[in-house]
Every structure is written in C-alpha cells, then in structure tokens.
Image: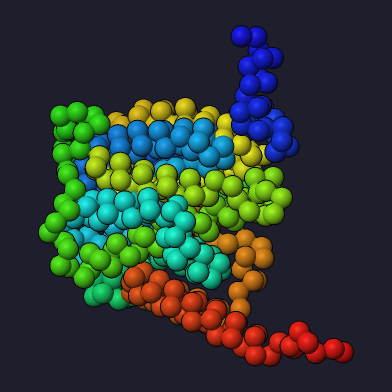
Amino acid sequence: MSMSSMKSNLDNFFLITARNSSIRTELLAGSYTFLSLSYIFVIHPVILRGAGFEVHSVLAATVFVSVIATFASGLWTGLPFVFAPGLEMSLYLAFVAILMHHLSVRQTLGIAFVTGATVCLLPFRTIKHHLIDRVPHRFPNAVALTMAVFLLTVACSLMGLIDFHKGYLTFTGQSDNRTALIGLGGVLGIIFFEILGVKPSVLITVVIVAALSKAQPGPSTETSHLLISVIKPDFISWYADIRAWEAVFVLFVLSCYGSLAKVINLARNTTIEDAHGALPGVRKILFLDGVTTVAGSVMGSTNFTTFVESGVGIAAGGRTGLAAVVTAILMVAGFILRPFIDYVPLTAAVGALVYVGFLFIPKGDSLTAFRRFEFLIIVLMLGITICTLNLGAAFGIGLVGFWVGNGWSRIHESQTAKPATDLP
C-alpha cells in the first residue's frame, strides 16, 4: 500500500478532513496529550500506595487498561478523548473512603467494580433518559467545580496546612514546614514549565520534587506477575455499610456527570460537535467509562474515566480518534516508570492536584450560565466539600437542589408566560 493510499484510508476512517484537521495535526495532538497526562502513571500509584494498595500492580493496571481503553476510544468513538484513572476518584477512595471511613482496599475495589458495572448501563435509552436527560444540564458543571475545590483542598491537606483527623476542617498553622514548602515548590514548578511551554510539565516537576526530597524507596509487595494484582475486589462484606453506599453514589456521580462535564466542555465550539451542537458518540464514551473501571478494579486499580488532559490535544487541534490512537501507543511507555515510583513521596502529588484542579474549573459561559438559586446551591456544595470532604452530602444536596430548582423555574415560567391566543 502506497503512502498516499494509507493517508487516504486514515482520512476516510477518522473523518479527518471533514473535521477540518490533518494527519500531522492529529499526530501532534496525540503526542501532546500523552506528554501532559504522563504524570498519572506516577501520581496515581503513589496516591493509592498511601492507602495500602500494591504500587506496582496499580501501575501495571493503569498502563494496561489506559492503553486498551484509549485505543478503543479512538477506533470506536472516532473522538480524541483518552482514558486513564480519575485522579479525583483515586483521592476520594484513598483519603475519604479508606483513611476517613475505614473501608478496606478490597472493599473499595468491589465498590469501584459495582460503580463501573452500573455506568455500563447508562447508554441504554431508558436509563439515560431518567438519569441524565432529566437532570438539569448545568449540574455536571457544578460537579466539576466541586471536584476542583476537592482537589485543591486535599492538596492543602497533603502540604500539612489543614487536616481532617476530627472529621472536619482543622487548620494546623504549619505553613512554614518543609512539607508545605516542597508542595508549594511543586506548584510553582508546574507554573514555570507551563509558561515556558515545556511538556511534560507535571512529570518533570514530580521528578524534581522527588530528587529534592531525597525520598527513600517505599514499602513494596512483590507480585507473582506484572499484570496480576495480589489484592482482589470484595463484593460482599460492604453491602450493609452506609459509608460504602455513599462511596458508590459519589463514584457514580463522578463517572456519569463528571465525565459528561469534561466531554461537553472540551468539545464545545469545535468541529467535534455536529451541526446541532450535539456530541456524537457520548453514549460510547460513557460505556467505555464503565468497562474500563470494571477491568481496572479486577486488576487492582480504582475508577477509570475520560481524562481531562484530553483538552490538551483538542487545544492543539486534535479532532478525531487518530489523536487518541497515537496517545494509546505512547502510553505503553508508562511501564518504564516502574522502578521510579518507589522513590516518589506523596508530597510530589500536590502540584498535580492543583494543576488538575484548575483544569476541572468550567470555562467561559459554563460558569456564567448558572441561575441565581443554582449559585446558592453550588456555594453550599463547595462549603460542605471544603469543611468536611463529604462529597456524598455535597452531591446529594446539589442533585436535589438543581432538580427542584429547575422544576420550580419551569412552573414559574409557564405561569408567567403570555397565552398563545393573546394578541398584542
């Protein structure tokens, strides 16, 4: 097959020209996406290590599932969205479900499995109608904003500025300690490299922070096989625990509405949208969210999701699944980081949390489109998150508040609208 014929086939399969892109642009976009998200292959295992997960098994599951899911996303959906472990989900399970609510690692893996299996049902028309279409379309952006605050709050906790040992926010007054300075240095390092346009800014900063911290290798459990976890999901023991079901609810909201917020906001005002402003393939993306989480939990990792760094490739011009395929191929290099993650301290995650937190914040008219009562609900959601890290309560209040407020607005509008028979 000649080169021109191969280019023509790629163009026809991925609709590259139809979306005003080019093969070169898609290749670059996929490469930029990989460089931007490469930090997840370090930060995700390090975060879960602190909660008792086997770090090398987590890395193996992270790379393997991310590669397969992102490759499938590129070929099946034809969109430039990539899949990887959700940093917000890893943090919630590690710091809230395990360390604060005292669930076990095996129980959290079982919870992740059940959540993933539930998300797999979302593409079905009836379920999608009741769980997605009937929910106010601004609620996903409220979830995204809440997660941005959650990530920033946990970052402050990792720096030792605050803690939640009593179950609520407590200021430690230790702003000048070494841990806080290292965390702040990580944030400033990412900002510095981002200004210079150096990629991968987050991974480079993590390496520098690890080197300056002179961290010793963390405890590690050898596994019999690189891709088989020694920790298996527990599907039974947590069914009577209300805290476990709170975790199921939180993970479901993040997998469903959080993913929708990311996908919709990243695709808005690009040629990825169709002529009606709709996003083709969104059902496939939700299904892949569920399948990857199920696969990841069986292999010893937490929830996978549409990754927010997909926006880097989209900003670079990526509009088709070819960009995702390129990212998937490059993701295989994540296995190279296996010896390095033992030397990365948890403090090195601070910069990444701040970086991802700002990526979560909805952009442009997504923030100004909220109604007045919705702003009040969001303030309450953010307050609960900052003071208690109780995402279950925050999402529950937000979901009910948005639904009731939206219904009240429709009734008010229908009562104040002028009858169709009235003539001026």
Asked where in the image residue 332 lies, by quadrant, the reply is top left
Asked where in the image residue 392 lies, by quadrant, the reply is bottom left
Query: Which residue occupies 61% across, 28% down?
Result: 13
Residue 72 horizontal side relative to residue 116, left or right: right
Q: Residue furthest right?
A: 424
In the depicted view, which residue is nearer to us: 141 or 17? Answer: 17
Residue 274's x, y, as percent? 67, 48
Colour convention of the picture: rainbow
Query: Which residue occupies 25% across, 36% down?
Result: 56
| Vertical side of 396 occupied by 256: above or below | above
| Vertical side of 118 occupied by 219: above or below | above
Residue 371's x, y, as percent? 61, 78
Asked if one can make out residue 333 in the rendered structure from this viewpoint, the answer is yes
In the depicted view, which residue is nearer to us: 251 or 181? Answer: 251
Q: Residue furthest left?
A: 237
- The quadrant of the image that shows the N terminus is top right
Query: Which residue occupies 30% across, 76% down?
Result: 168
In the depicted view, which residue is nearer to us: 285 or 111? Answer: 285
| Vertical side of 60 occupied by 355: above or below | below
Asked if one can make out residue 194 in the rendered structure from this viewpoint, the answer is no
Residue 191 horizontal side relative to residue 128, left or right: right
Query: Which residue occupies 44% across, 73% down?
Result: 399
Residue 189 horizontal side relative to residue 365, left or right: left
Residue 18's x, y, as percent? 71, 36
- The quadrant of the image that shows the C terminus is bottom right
In this rendering, the count of numbered labels is: 0
In the depicted view, which residue is nearer to us: 423 or 369? Answer: 423
